Image (cartoon, rainbow, N blue to C red):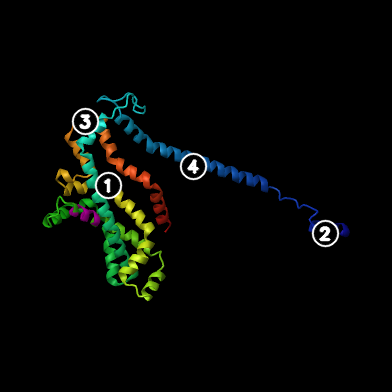
Amino acid sequence: MTALISQETEAARDGNVTPEAPRGRAPRFRSRRFRTRVSKVIASIILLAFTAVVLTPIWVLVMVSLHHGNTSPSNPFALPAPIDFQNYVNAFQNMHYLRSVGNTLVITLATAVITVFAASLAAWAIVRHTRRWTRTLYQIFVSGLTIPIFVVLTPLYEVMQKLHLLDSYIGIVLAYTATIMPFAVFFFAGFLRTVPAELEEAAAVDGAGLIRTYWKIVFPLLRPATATLAIFVILQVWNDLILPLVLLSSDDKQTVTLAVYATIGTHTMSPEQLLPTLVLGVLPLFIVFLLLQRYVVAGIAVGAGK
């Protein structure tokens, strides 16, 4: 018996005997793989359902806006026959579309640039130069997140009136920058706390000043956060109606949202005439997103990872 056991041991050592697979491993593996497939199928179904919920109103909006005449279509989901673009031509003319889009682009881009640079500089000073006044300044910025825009509308209007900045690009850009700055400083400060300060210290040892350190070291490190914040600012300014309605009065400075509001308020419209106005209002932002979606998603993903 001892000899037989030793022979089996030597054979197993030489590789002539295949060790028996543990019982129950294959069924457990199959069960885990089955659960993984089921979870993927369920996730795909949920994703498709949410996609349908989001896209269905957009599809109905476009289909009804292409309908001919002033009568409502019997089936709003069906492609109209014939397709009529006259409602879009009328909306384009009533909105003074090119002028309102140009105004919105100027205000949006100016606000994004000023907010990014001002907020990044303020957040850098708060995070890297920890003093009592910087902590107090940060608390003031954070407290601004709790104040609704409706609370500051009247004081903001009075300040702009005394500075003679009503109905001007400079006034509304400064107003947007002031209202977005609390979130922008909070966002940049949180990102900068995850960035090591060794590179800035090395630049200071090499004799770089504050401006050069910021422009050559700090700002390039903030690119993911900058992309994310710029997207937020663009969406916020482009879709806003409150500040243009309060601070802008002349027709030649109307933004897209203000033009949509004015067109709806001054014309009696059927749904077929109203919906092209709404489509034209969001169309430029939709085109920009399609062209830059890779950079938009990458900026959001990297910024969220930080």
Point out the tag, 1 or 3, that comes first from the N-terminus.
1
**Secondary structure of the magenta portion, mostly?**
helix
Q: Which residues are magenta?
A: 170-177
Q: Are marks 1 and 4 in contact (CB under 8 Å)?
A: no
Image coordinates for residue 100, horizontal then vertical, percent: 22, 43
* Residue 156 numbered tag: none
Q: CA distance from mark 2 to mark 3?
A: 93 Å
Secondary element type, mark 3: loop
The residue that mark 3 highlights is 269
Near mark 1 (Cα within 10 A), the count class, few <14, some 14-19 or many ≥20, is many
Secondary element type, mark 4: helix
Please tell me which residue is depicted at 30% across the width and 64% down the height of the picture: 121
* Residue 43 numbered tag: 4
Q: Is residue 236 above or below residue 144?
A: above
Q: Are marks 4 and 3 in contact (CB under 8 Å)?
A: no
Q: Amino acid at mark 2?
A: Glu
Name the quadrant containing residue 159: bottom left
Point out the tag, 2 or 3, that comes first from the N-terminus.
2
Q: Nearer the viewer, mark 2 or mark 3?
A: 3
Q: Nearer the viewer, mark 1 or mark 4?
A: 1
Q: Is residue 93 above or below residue 166?
A: above
The residue that mark 2 highlights is 10
Tally of numbered discs: 4
Point out the tag, 1 or 4, that comes first from the N-terminus.
4
